[in-house]
Amino acid sequence: MEDGDDADALEASLIENLARLDPDEVSQWETFSRLVRQGRTVPDIAVTFGITDLKVKRILALGDLLPKIREAYRREEIDTETVRHLTMASKAQQKDWLALCADPDQYAPRGYQLKQWLFGGQSISTKVALFAIEEYPGLITSDLFGEDSYFADADLFWQKQNEAIATKRDTYLNEGWSEVVLLEPGQYFHAWDHEKTPKKKGGKIVITVSHRGEVECHEGWLSRKEARRAREGGEQEETAAKLPRPEVTGPMQNYIELHRHAAVRAAMLDHPAVALRLVVAHAITGSGLWQVRPEPQRAANETVTASLAGCKAEAAFGKKRREVLALLGSPDEDSLVAGGNGDAVAIAGVFARLLALCDDDVMRVLTLVMAETLAAGSAVIEALGNHLNVDMGIWWQPDDAFFDLLRDKEIANSMLADVGGKLVADGNVAEKVKTQKNIIRDFLAGENGRPRVETWLPRWMKFPAESYTSRGGFRTADQWTQVQPLFVRE
């Protein structure tokens, strides 16, 4: 070893002890923690001692406990199950648990009861509030024999705390931090998996929220992988190379496109002159569908298929299609009008039938054929939908499939602001996506004390379509941006 190499010395000491006799677990925890402080990574330690990354992380989690807890475990005063549950506790919770152990008149929960104590039903101390206590409109109870006071209404506390968290997040972003990551309630921040990184080099803010209301803001961190990439490629190259997460998932994009397609082509049936002009445009320019074949309406999964089957626009379109098939003398009421096999005799038969129809009936046939061959998810849908002033509220309402496909917490919070206002959205900013979606549904149904909102449309479904974020990845809005200059209204 070279002189002054403290990390190598620590490794050599622990390896020597392992060769003689397994050291006690506390010694491993303390040594691994010191190695991390000396610059060793989790994979480095795992390779050196021949164990898995997962075991190293578990040992580091145990080593992050308060010294008194580690010593009590070394003396076998704490059992293994209890000490493992304590790794999920914040420093404040660990101190509270030690205080219970030291008080002969109190019971310190252990084992499974400790886990229940950590994650459920405990009184929330006023010490954890980010907001001014004077702003809390509910009842606060005090311990006559202690110094702590508690919020009597946990739901009201969380509303105020979430509003304060949202304000803190906005403050960080206004100060120029690249990103504020808000972890799920109870999710722990592992410092050994991250590196301290200043704001100017892309460092992020990580906010953790415990089940007891404690909020910790970890300023200036990057995961080890992100930090390594920043060192290798430089901050500017890394920022350019890393693509932002798309605003909508593939299935959600598919869901939006098919419903918009259904509504636009159903609305177009009342505008045969527009359909005629579209036919001419297709004939001159051509398209991926003009061979001629109908739009296949392929759904990404069964959820989207079921939603489209119950779509009001699809039902209206099916009725008009059956009327056209009757005009053409087709015995199959459920078949497509377009998409024949190109047989000359079949074409002559359709031609003969059309010769016997009046101009109005021919236009009905032409309009429906244009609708069947209109490509879903194309810029034409955006141009046509905006030209016809299609009101999606007539043809579509949020259904189970829409909420099942909504997975982004930031987007769900923005939609909650649409229906319930910013105060409600900020009051639930740290809640899970599922919780926020349930609140949106309460507003739409007028349930659980929420005022009913009857005419809400997500920005994704309106004409023109709008994004909720600046992340990009929403193809529908991008397509309207491309064609909008061509359709300037007086």
Image (cartoon, rainbow, N blue to C red):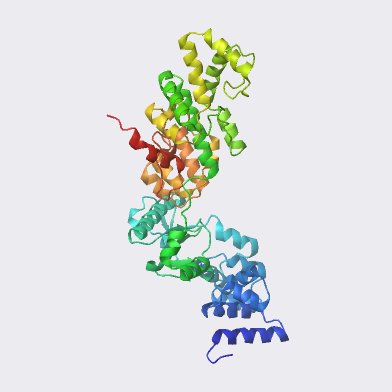
Residue in view at x 58 percent, y 14 percent: 350
Quadrant location, the C terminus: top left
Residue 327 seen: no
Q: Which quarter of the picture shows residue 340?
A: top right
Question: Percent x, y for residue 206?
Answer: 45, 62
Percent across and percent down for residue 64 are: 55, 73
Question: Which image quadrant for residue 277?
Answer: top left
Residue at the far front: name it.
344
Above or below — where is 277 with respect to 1? Answer: above
Q: Residue furthest bottom?
A: 3
Q: Nearer the viewer, residue 140 or 370?
A: 370
As drawn, 78 above or below 131: below
What percent of the width, then of the height, locates residue 123? 49, 57
Q: Please give left or right for residue 81 compared with residue 408 in the image.
A: right
Residue 51 in sight from this viewpoint: yes
Looking at the picture, how far across and down is residue 24, in whole percent?
A: 67, 80
The N terminus - image quarter: bottom right
Residue at the location (56% across, 61% down)? 118
Is 148 in front, or is 370?
370
Q: Nearer the viewer, residue 398 or 156?
A: 398
Q: In the rendered view, would you say 177 is above or below 67?
A: above
Q: How many numbered marks does the figure carry? A: 0
145 lies above or below 465: below
